[in-house]
Image (cartoon, rainbow, N blue to C red):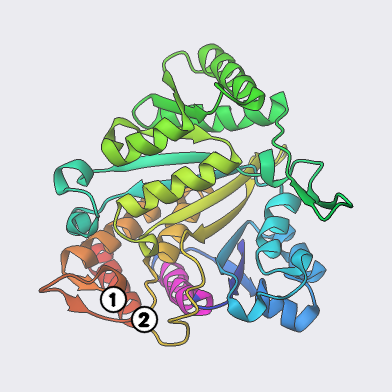
Amino acid sequence: MEKILILPGDGIGPEVMGEVRRVIDWFGTNRGFETQIEEELVGGCAYDAHGAAISDAAMALAKAADAVLFGAVGGPKWDNVPYEARPEAGLLRLRGDLELFANLRPAICFPALADSSSLKRDIIEGLDIMIVRELTGGVYFGEPRGIEDLGNGQRRGVNTQVYDTYEIERIARVAGDLAMKRDKRLASAEKRNVMESGLLWHEEVTKVISSEFPDVALEHVLADNCAMQLVRNPKQYDVLVTDNLFGDLLSDVAAMLTGSLGMLPSASLGAPDADSGRARALYEPVHGSAPDIAGQGKANPIASIMSFAMALRYTFDRGADADLLENAVTRVLDQGIRTGDIMQPGMVETGTSGMGDAVLAALDELGDA
Protein backbone atom coordinates (compact mmCIF):
# COMPACT_ATOMS: atom_id res chain seq x y z
CA MET A 1 0.00 0.00 0.00
CA GLU A 2 1.37 3.38 -1.02
CA LYS A 3 1.80 6.10 1.61
CA ILE A 4 0.82 9.63 0.62
CA LEU A 5 1.03 12.73 2.79
CA ILE A 6 -1.21 15.62 1.72
CA LEU A 7 -0.20 19.12 2.80
CA PRO A 8 -2.94 21.45 1.52
CA GLY A 9 -1.46 24.61 3.00
CA ASP A 10 -3.02 28.07 2.72
CA GLY A 11 -5.28 30.05 0.41
CA ILE A 12 -6.59 27.95 -2.45
CA GLY A 13 -4.41 25.01 -1.40
CA PRO A 14 -7.17 23.11 0.46
CA GLU A 15 -9.62 23.63 -2.43
CA VAL A 16 -7.39 22.31 -5.19
CA MET A 17 -6.05 19.47 -3.04
CA GLY A 18 -9.63 18.42 -2.31
CA GLU A 19 -10.05 17.71 -6.03
CA VAL A 20 -6.80 15.75 -6.07
CA ARG A 21 -8.14 13.64 -3.21
CA ARG A 22 -11.20 12.79 -5.36
CA VAL A 23 -8.93 11.77 -8.24
CA ILE A 24 -6.84 9.55 -5.97
CA ASP A 25 -10.02 7.87 -4.76
CA TRP A 26 -11.06 7.28 -8.38
CA PHE A 27 -7.79 5.46 -9.11
CA GLY A 28 -8.25 3.42 -5.95
CA THR A 29 -11.73 2.34 -6.98
CA ASN A 30 -11.11 1.86 -10.69
CA ARG A 31 -7.41 1.07 -11.11
CA GLY A 32 -6.44 -0.78 -7.94
CA PHE A 33 -4.28 2.06 -6.60
CA GLU A 34 -4.21 1.30 -2.88
CA THR A 35 -3.13 4.17 -0.68
CA GLN A 36 -2.79 5.17 2.93
CA ILE A 37 -3.38 8.92 3.03
CA GLU A 38 -2.53 11.27 5.88
CA GLU A 39 -3.01 15.04 6.01
CA GLU A 40 -1.08 17.71 7.91
CA LEU A 41 -0.61 21.47 8.15
CA VAL A 42 2.05 23.53 6.37
CA GLY A 43 2.62 27.24 5.85
CA GLY A 44 0.68 30.00 7.55
CA CYS A 45 -1.94 27.68 9.01
CA ALA A 46 0.85 25.62 10.59
CA TYR A 47 2.32 28.79 12.07
CA ASP A 48 -1.07 29.67 13.56
CA ALA A 49 -1.34 26.20 15.10
CA HIS A 50 2.26 25.45 16.08
CA GLY A 51 4.32 28.63 15.76
CA ALA A 52 6.31 27.10 12.89
CA ALA A 53 5.70 26.75 9.15
CA ILE A 54 5.82 22.97 9.52
CA SER A 55 5.87 20.91 12.69
CA ASP A 56 8.33 18.15 13.55
CA ALA A 57 5.41 15.70 13.53
CA ALA A 58 4.48 16.69 9.98
CA MET A 59 8.11 16.35 8.90
CA ALA A 60 8.22 12.84 10.36
CA LEU A 61 5.17 11.91 8.28
CA ALA A 62 6.78 13.42 5.19
CA LYS A 63 9.91 11.33 5.70
CA ALA A 64 7.82 8.17 6.05
CA ALA A 65 5.66 8.87 2.99
CA ASP A 66 6.29 7.56 -0.50
CA ALA A 67 5.11 10.89 -1.89
CA VAL A 68 4.11 14.27 -0.49
CA LEU A 69 1.38 16.23 -2.28
CA PHE A 70 1.70 19.93 -1.53
CA GLY A 71 -0.86 22.69 -2.13
CA ALA A 72 0.32 26.28 -1.64
CA VAL A 73 1.44 28.49 1.23
CA GLY A 74 1.44 32.13 2.24
CA GLY A 75 -0.75 35.20 2.17
CA PRO A 76 -0.84 38.74 3.54
CA LYS A 77 -2.08 37.49 6.89
CA TRP A 78 1.45 36.29 7.66
CA ASP A 79 3.46 39.17 6.19
CA ASN A 80 4.76 40.20 9.60
CA VAL A 81 5.63 36.86 11.18
CA PRO A 82 9.29 36.24 12.05
CA TYR A 83 11.33 35.57 8.91
CA GLU A 84 12.36 32.07 10.00
CA ALA A 85 8.69 31.17 10.56
CA ARG A 86 7.31 32.62 7.30
CA PRO A 87 4.98 30.23 5.45
CA GLU A 88 7.53 29.55 2.70
CA ALA A 89 9.97 28.23 5.30
CA GLY A 90 7.85 25.08 5.52
CA LEU A 91 8.46 24.31 1.87
CA LEU A 92 12.17 25.07 2.18
CA ARG A 93 12.44 22.71 5.17
CA LEU A 94 10.67 19.97 3.25
CA ARG A 95 13.08 20.36 0.35
CA GLY A 96 16.10 20.46 2.63
CA ASP A 97 15.23 17.73 5.13
CA LEU A 98 13.99 15.36 2.42
CA GLU A 99 17.06 16.19 0.29
CA LEU A 100 14.91 16.97 -2.74
CA PHE A 101 17.61 18.28 -5.02
CA ALA A 102 15.93 17.91 -8.43
CA ASN A 103 12.92 19.99 -9.39
CA LEU A 104 11.12 18.96 -12.58
CA ARG A 105 8.83 21.61 -14.07
CA PRO A 106 7.20 20.77 -17.37
CA ALA A 107 5.93 23.63 -19.51
CA ILE A 108 3.30 22.14 -21.81
CA CYS A 109 0.93 24.05 -24.04
CA PHE A 110 -2.32 22.15 -24.41
CA PRO A 111 -3.63 22.61 -27.98
CA ALA A 112 -6.97 23.88 -26.68
CA LEU A 113 -5.20 26.66 -24.75
CA ALA A 114 -2.74 27.87 -27.36
CA ASP A 115 -4.66 31.12 -27.74
CA SER A 116 -4.41 31.80 -23.99
CA SER A 117 -0.70 32.47 -24.26
CA SER A 118 0.59 36.00 -24.74
CA LEU A 119 2.67 34.64 -27.63
CA LYS A 120 1.40 33.84 -31.10
CA ARG A 121 -0.10 30.39 -31.63
CA ASP A 122 2.56 29.26 -34.13
CA ILE A 123 5.29 30.01 -31.58
CA ILE A 124 3.64 28.28 -28.64
CA GLU A 125 1.48 25.48 -30.05
CA GLY A 126 3.01 22.08 -29.32
CA LEU A 127 5.36 23.40 -26.64
CA ASP A 128 6.69 20.65 -24.38
CA ILE A 129 9.71 21.64 -22.30
CA MET A 130 11.04 19.97 -19.17
CA ILE A 131 13.00 22.32 -16.92
CA VAL A 132 15.29 20.60 -14.41
CA ARG A 133 16.18 22.97 -11.55
CA GLU A 134 18.76 22.23 -8.86
CA LEU A 135 16.82 22.77 -5.67
CA THR A 136 18.95 22.47 -2.53
CA GLY A 137 22.11 24.42 -3.35
CA GLY A 138 23.12 27.77 -4.75
CA VAL A 139 22.26 31.21 -3.47
CA TYR A 140 19.12 30.16 -1.57
CA PHE A 141 21.11 27.94 0.77
CA GLY A 142 24.69 29.25 0.57
CA GLU A 143 26.57 30.59 3.58
CA PRO A 144 27.39 33.20 4.70
CA ARG A 145 24.04 34.94 4.43
CA GLY A 146 22.16 37.59 6.35
CA ILE A 147 21.88 41.32 6.97
CA GLU A 148 24.61 43.06 8.98
CA ASP A 149 24.84 46.51 10.52
CA LEU A 150 27.99 48.27 9.34
CA GLY A 151 27.84 50.73 12.23
CA ASN A 152 27.81 53.89 10.11
CA GLY A 153 24.14 54.08 9.29
CA GLN A 154 24.61 51.54 6.52
CA ARG A 155 23.56 47.91 6.35
CA ARG A 156 24.73 45.07 4.11
CA GLY A 157 22.72 42.13 2.79
CA VAL A 158 24.71 39.02 1.92
CA ASN A 159 23.78 35.86 0.05
CA THR A 160 26.32 33.39 -1.24
CA GLN A 161 26.12 31.50 -4.52
CA VAL A 162 28.02 28.26 -3.99
CA TYR A 163 28.04 24.83 -5.65
CA ASP A 164 30.15 21.73 -5.07
CA THR A 165 30.96 19.24 -7.80
CA TYR A 166 28.66 16.52 -6.47
CA GLU A 167 25.65 18.85 -6.49
CA ILE A 168 26.17 19.66 -10.16
CA GLU A 169 26.92 16.07 -11.10
CA ARG A 170 23.73 14.64 -9.63
CA ILE A 171 21.41 17.21 -11.22
CA ALA A 172 23.20 16.74 -14.55
CA ARG A 173 22.53 13.00 -14.32
CA VAL A 174 18.82 13.59 -13.71
CA ALA A 175 18.71 15.90 -16.73
CA GLY A 176 20.71 13.52 -18.89
CA ASP A 177 18.43 10.62 -18.01
CA LEU A 178 15.33 12.65 -18.86
CA ALA A 179 16.89 13.78 -22.14
CA MET A 180 17.54 10.15 -23.09
CA LYS A 181 13.86 9.35 -22.48
CA ARG A 182 12.71 12.32 -24.57
CA ASP A 183 14.40 13.88 -27.61
CA LYS A 184 18.04 13.44 -26.55
CA ARG A 185 18.53 17.22 -26.46
CA LEU A 186 19.72 19.06 -23.37
CA ALA A 187 20.45 22.74 -22.78
CA SER A 188 22.33 23.92 -19.69
CA ALA A 189 21.92 27.53 -18.51
CA GLU A 190 24.33 29.47 -16.27
CA LYS A 191 26.32 32.73 -16.18
CA ARG A 192 29.88 31.51 -16.69
CA ASN A 193 30.84 34.86 -18.23
CA VAL A 194 30.58 36.67 -14.87
CA MET A 195 30.28 33.98 -12.18
CA GLU A 196 32.86 31.39 -11.15
CA SER A 197 30.05 29.12 -9.95
CA GLY A 198 28.67 29.29 -13.49
CA LEU A 199 32.03 28.32 -14.94
CA LEU A 200 32.20 25.31 -12.62
CA TRP A 201 28.61 24.42 -13.56
CA HIS A 202 29.51 24.56 -17.27
CA GLU A 203 32.56 22.35 -16.83
CA GLU A 204 30.96 19.72 -14.61
CA VAL A 205 27.77 19.39 -16.68
CA THR A 206 29.92 18.92 -19.77
CA LYS A 207 31.91 16.15 -18.08
CA VAL A 208 28.84 14.22 -16.90
CA ILE A 209 26.90 14.40 -20.16
CA SER A 210 29.86 13.64 -22.43
CA SER A 211 30.99 10.64 -20.36
CA GLU A 212 27.67 9.17 -19.19
CA PHE A 213 25.18 10.29 -21.85
CA PRO A 214 27.17 10.45 -25.10
CA ASP A 215 24.02 10.22 -27.22
CA VAL A 216 22.61 13.43 -25.73
CA ALA A 217 23.22 16.61 -27.70
CA LEU A 218 24.32 19.19 -25.11
CA GLU A 219 24.31 22.94 -25.63
CA HIS A 220 25.22 25.68 -23.17
CA VAL A 221 23.37 28.97 -22.97
CA LEU A 222 23.83 32.01 -20.76
CA ALA A 223 20.84 32.31 -18.44
CA ASP A 224 19.85 35.82 -19.51
CA ASN A 225 19.98 34.81 -23.16
CA CYS A 226 17.96 31.72 -22.28
CA ALA A 227 15.18 33.91 -20.87
CA MET A 228 15.12 35.85 -24.12
CA GLN A 229 15.14 32.67 -26.21
CA LEU A 230 12.23 31.21 -24.22
CA VAL A 231 10.12 34.16 -25.32
CA ARG A 232 11.52 34.32 -28.87
CA ASN A 233 11.54 30.63 -29.80
CA PRO A 234 10.70 28.35 -26.86
CA LYS A 235 10.34 25.17 -28.91
CA GLN A 236 14.09 25.13 -29.58
CA TYR A 237 14.43 23.59 -26.10
CA ASP A 238 13.43 20.13 -24.90
CA VAL A 239 15.16 19.52 -21.54
CA LEU A 240 16.73 22.52 -19.82
CA VAL A 241 18.92 22.15 -16.71
CA THR A 242 19.98 25.05 -14.52
CA ASP A 243 20.79 26.08 -10.98
CA ASN A 244 18.48 27.07 -8.15
CA LEU A 245 18.23 30.82 -8.76
CA PHE A 246 18.08 30.77 -12.55
CA GLY A 247 15.77 27.76 -12.43
CA ASP A 248 13.35 29.70 -10.26
CA LEU A 249 13.27 32.53 -12.79
CA LEU A 250 13.36 30.58 -16.06
CA SER A 251 10.69 28.09 -15.02
CA ASP A 252 8.30 30.94 -14.25
CA VAL A 253 9.01 32.46 -17.67
CA ALA A 254 8.31 29.10 -19.30
CA ALA A 255 5.18 28.66 -17.21
CA MET A 256 3.61 31.87 -18.44
CA LEU A 257 4.29 30.90 -22.05
CA THR A 258 1.54 28.34 -21.64
CA GLY A 259 -1.08 30.91 -20.63
CA SER A 260 -1.70 30.18 -16.94
CA LEU A 261 0.25 29.22 -13.84
CA GLY A 262 -2.87 27.34 -12.78
CA MET A 263 -2.12 24.67 -15.38
CA LEU A 264 1.39 23.60 -14.49
CA PRO A 265 2.63 20.89 -12.10
CA SER A 266 6.06 20.19 -10.67
CA ALA A 267 7.97 17.39 -8.99
CA SER A 268 10.86 17.61 -6.54
CA LEU A 269 12.90 14.42 -6.27
CA GLY A 270 15.68 13.13 -4.06
CA ALA A 271 18.23 10.41 -4.63
CA PRO A 272 16.92 6.83 -5.04
CA ASP A 273 16.94 4.77 -1.85
CA ALA A 274 19.72 2.18 -1.85
CA ASP A 275 17.33 -0.64 -0.90
CA SER A 276 14.01 0.18 -2.55
CA GLY A 277 15.28 2.25 -5.46
CA ARG A 278 12.47 4.73 -4.78
CA ALA A 279 13.30 8.39 -4.24
CA ARG A 280 11.66 10.72 -1.77
CA ALA A 281 9.40 13.06 -3.68
CA LEU A 282 7.21 16.12 -3.30
CA TYR A 283 4.67 17.17 -5.93
CA GLU A 284 3.15 20.63 -6.10
CA PRO A 285 1.42 23.03 -8.47
CA VAL A 286 3.47 25.94 -9.72
CA HIS A 287 0.84 28.50 -8.73
CA GLY A 288 0.71 30.27 -5.38
CA SER A 289 -1.94 30.48 -2.68
CA ALA A 290 -4.03 33.15 -4.50
CA PRO A 291 -5.58 34.57 -1.32
CA ASP A 292 -7.75 36.93 -3.38
CA ILE A 293 -9.92 34.01 -4.55
CA ALA A 294 -9.44 31.61 -1.63
CA GLY A 295 -12.63 30.00 -0.40
CA GLN A 296 -14.65 31.10 -3.42
CA GLY A 297 -14.52 27.86 -5.40
CA LYS A 298 -12.89 29.62 -8.37
CA ALA A 299 -9.40 28.10 -8.29
CA ASN A 300 -8.13 25.96 -11.14
CA PRO A 301 -7.25 22.49 -9.77
CA ILE A 302 -5.59 21.22 -12.96
CA ALA A 303 -2.02 21.97 -11.86
CA SER A 304 -2.54 19.98 -8.66
CA ILE A 305 -4.22 17.16 -10.56
CA MET A 306 -1.36 17.08 -13.06
CA SER A 307 1.10 17.05 -10.16
CA PHE A 308 -0.55 13.84 -9.01
CA ALA A 309 -0.10 12.51 -12.56
CA MET A 310 3.63 13.18 -12.15
CA ALA A 311 3.53 11.23 -8.87
CA LEU A 312 1.93 8.31 -10.66
CA ARG A 313 4.70 8.41 -13.25
CA TYR A 314 7.83 9.16 -11.24
CA THR A 315 7.14 7.68 -7.78
CA PHE A 316 4.57 4.93 -8.23
CA ASP A 317 5.76 3.67 -11.64
CA ARG A 318 2.23 3.75 -13.03
CA GLY A 319 2.92 5.30 -16.40
CA ALA A 320 -0.31 4.06 -17.97
CA ASP A 321 -2.33 5.65 -15.16
CA ALA A 322 -0.39 8.90 -15.57
CA ASP A 323 -1.17 8.87 -19.29
CA LEU A 324 -4.83 8.23 -18.53
CA LEU A 325 -5.06 11.19 -16.17
CA GLU A 326 -3.22 13.53 -18.52
CA ASN A 327 -5.48 12.44 -21.39
CA ALA A 328 -8.53 13.08 -19.22
CA VAL A 329 -7.39 16.66 -18.58
CA THR A 330 -6.76 17.14 -22.29
CA ARG A 331 -10.26 15.87 -23.08
CA VAL A 332 -11.85 18.27 -20.60
CA LEU A 333 -10.03 21.21 -22.17
CA ASP A 334 -10.96 20.04 -25.67
CA GLN A 335 -14.58 20.04 -24.51
CA GLY A 336 -14.29 23.75 -23.78
CA ILE A 337 -14.58 23.52 -20.01
CA ARG A 338 -12.66 26.32 -18.31
CA THR A 339 -12.06 27.89 -14.92
CA GLY A 340 -11.90 31.67 -14.82
CA ASP A 341 -8.12 31.93 -15.19
CA ILE A 342 -8.20 30.20 -18.60
CA MET A 343 -11.65 31.31 -19.73
CA GLN A 344 -12.05 32.08 -23.44
CA PRO A 345 -14.98 33.38 -25.51
CA GLY A 346 -17.47 30.64 -26.33
CA MET A 347 -16.21 28.29 -23.64
CA VAL A 348 -18.11 26.98 -20.58
CA GLU A 349 -16.92 28.48 -17.30
CA THR A 350 -16.90 26.36 -14.18
CA GLY A 351 -15.36 26.41 -10.72
CA THR A 352 -12.96 24.25 -8.74
CA SER A 353 -15.33 21.38 -8.02
CA GLY A 354 -16.89 21.64 -11.49
CA MET A 355 -13.48 21.12 -13.07
CA GLY A 356 -12.91 18.18 -10.75
CA ASP A 357 -16.26 16.73 -11.81
CA ALA A 358 -15.29 17.10 -15.47
CA VAL A 359 -11.94 15.35 -14.99
CA LEU A 360 -13.61 12.47 -13.15
CA ALA A 361 -16.21 12.14 -15.92
CA ALA A 362 -13.45 12.06 -18.52
CA LEU A 363 -11.63 9.38 -16.51
CA ASP A 364 -14.83 7.33 -16.50
CA GLU A 365 -15.13 7.70 -20.26
CA LEU A 366 -11.50 6.96 -21.07
CA GLY A 367 -11.23 4.21 -18.49
CA ASP A 368 -14.10 2.33 -20.13
CA ALA A 369 -12.77 2.84 -23.64
Residue placed farthest to the left in the image? 346
Query: Tag 2, which secondary structure?
Result: loop
The residues bearing labels 1 and 2 have C-alpha atoms spaced at a distance of 7 Å
Amino acid of disc 2: Lys
Q: Which mark is residue 340?
A: 1
In the rendered image, residue 256, in percent from the top left (x then y), is placed at 35, 54
* Mark 1, other Cα within 10 Å: few <14 / some 14–19 / many ≥20: some
Instruction: Answer left or right for 148 relative to 116.
Output: right
- The residue beneath circle 2 is 298
Q: Which mark is residue 132?
A: none
Amino acid of disc 1: Gly
* Mark 2, other Cα within 10 Å: few <14 / some 14–19 / many ≥20: many
The front one of 22 and 351 is 351
Residue placed farthest to the right in the image? 151
The front one of 283 and 318 is 283
Q: Main secondary structure of the magenta part?
A: helix
Quarter containing the N terminus: bottom right
User: Could one spot residue 272 in this view of the protein?
Assistant: no
In the rendered image, residue 224, in percent from the top left (x then y), is placed at 45, 34
In the rendered image, residue 199, in percent from the top left (x then y), is placed at 61, 20
In the rendered image, residue 119, in percent from the top left (x then y), is placed at 22, 49
Residue drawn at 63 percent across, 56 percent down: 66
Q: Please check the rendered image and state whether residue 16 is part of the magenta-colored stretch, yes or no.
A: yes
Marks 1 and 2 in Cβ contact (< 8 Å): yes
Q: Which of disc 2 and disc 1 is earlier in sequence?
A: 2
The magenta stretch spans which residues? 13-29
